[in-house]
Image: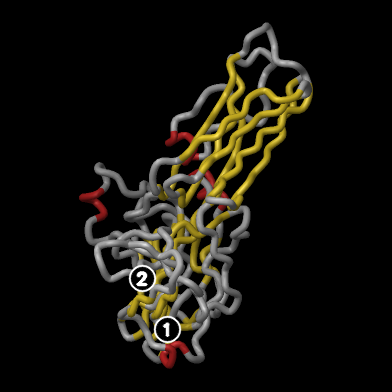
Amino acid sequence: MKLAGAAFVLALPFASPALAEGFFLSSPIDCDLTSDCYIQQYVDTDPSPAALDFSCSTLTYDGHKGTDFALTSRAKIQDNIRVLASASGQVKAVRDGMDDTGHSDETADAIAGRECGNGVLIDHGDGWETQYCHLKKGSISVRSGQQVSEGQGLGFVGQSGAAAFPHVHLSVRKDGKVVDPFDPDGETVCATPGDSSLWNDRPDYRAGGLIDVRFSQTIPQFDEIKAGTAGAGTLVADAPALVIWGYLFGSQPDDIINLSIYGPDGLVVEDDVTLPKTQAQSFRAIGKKLRGKEWGSGEYKGTVTMIRGPQIISQKTILMMIE
């Protein structure tokens, strides 16, 4: 499906503009969406087996019915990042007690029918509901029938239910029908996306980017990166290799990842990596093996840049001392 050069409109079975009047949302997560967390996936606005988010990009998957506000690693679950009520209302249902094991072949049977994991459902009146999924086990602080205010804590972000990464999944419904809070009028115009919104303060759209960048002395396993256990704050002078890696989300075919390490004596290593396909999450790394007895002492700077076409869409730099 070629989108460039012309407006492309999808008529969607969501709420109409009139239904959105008077109902607005605040963020369901207590964190900085530019650094501490990010939006990994949006509502699928394409009724076909294909999948498009409200901007006609690929930060979604077929049939996805909410917005996923994600933490940068599984280790961040221990920081107890609060899940917040996006609007005032009455708690309609809660579930707690499910482990934060996430979705895998081993857990699929145990979570069948409970894919939301630990969650909260809030009735806002006039047919509006919000649902919050994948909360941390034992963290839910509200009960069924309780009145809650906008911004009130409901629990902590976790990875319960069918969650491939730690996040809170926010679903918005009007009279039982899915509403995309970034496009409540139900018409996506790719040339000018997002000209309506349910947000009091609409989160900026990031069409992919860098989740984390770190040094290490070996190329880590991807599961270590996702867990938050990869990387090193410092390296010893005789480390066998000097590696820089970047943890990515929302990559697309032909994206270029530039990775570089500069040391006290100048360039250590640099390379461009062209990505072959769309991926929700991935990582890339480059490094250089130690050729002498030790690395030179001083400051080392690692930079990872994500480039799409002529634009830099994300860049992160990390500094490290070798003494």
Location of the N terminus by quadrant is bottom left
Residue 1's place in the image compared with 121, above or below, is above
Which color scheme is applied? Answer: secondary structure
Which residue is at 43% across, 66% downward?
Answer: 67
Q: Which mark is residue 275?
A: none
Which residue is at 55% across, 34% downward?
Answer: 272
Per the image, label 2 sits on a secondary structure element best described as loop
**Residue 260 lies in what quarter of the image?**
top right
Which residue is at 55% across, 54% downward?
Answer: 80
Residue 78's place in the image compared with 193, above or below, is above
Name the residue carrying label 1.
185
Q: Which mark is residue 45?
A: 2
User: How much space separates mark 2 and mark 1, taking CA atoms?
Assistant: 12 Å
Name the spot of residue 23 as percent of width and height, x first.
49, 86
Residue type at the position of mark 1: Asp
Residue type at the position of mark 2: Thr
Query: Along the horizontal axis of the image, is 251 left or right of 176?
Result: right
Which residue is at 48% across, 74% downward?
Answer: 182
Query: Residue lying farthest front?
Result: 5
Label 1, residues with CA under 10 Å away: few <14, some 14-19, many ≥20: many
Location of the C terminus by quadrant is top right
Per the image, label 1 sits on a secondary structure element best described as loop
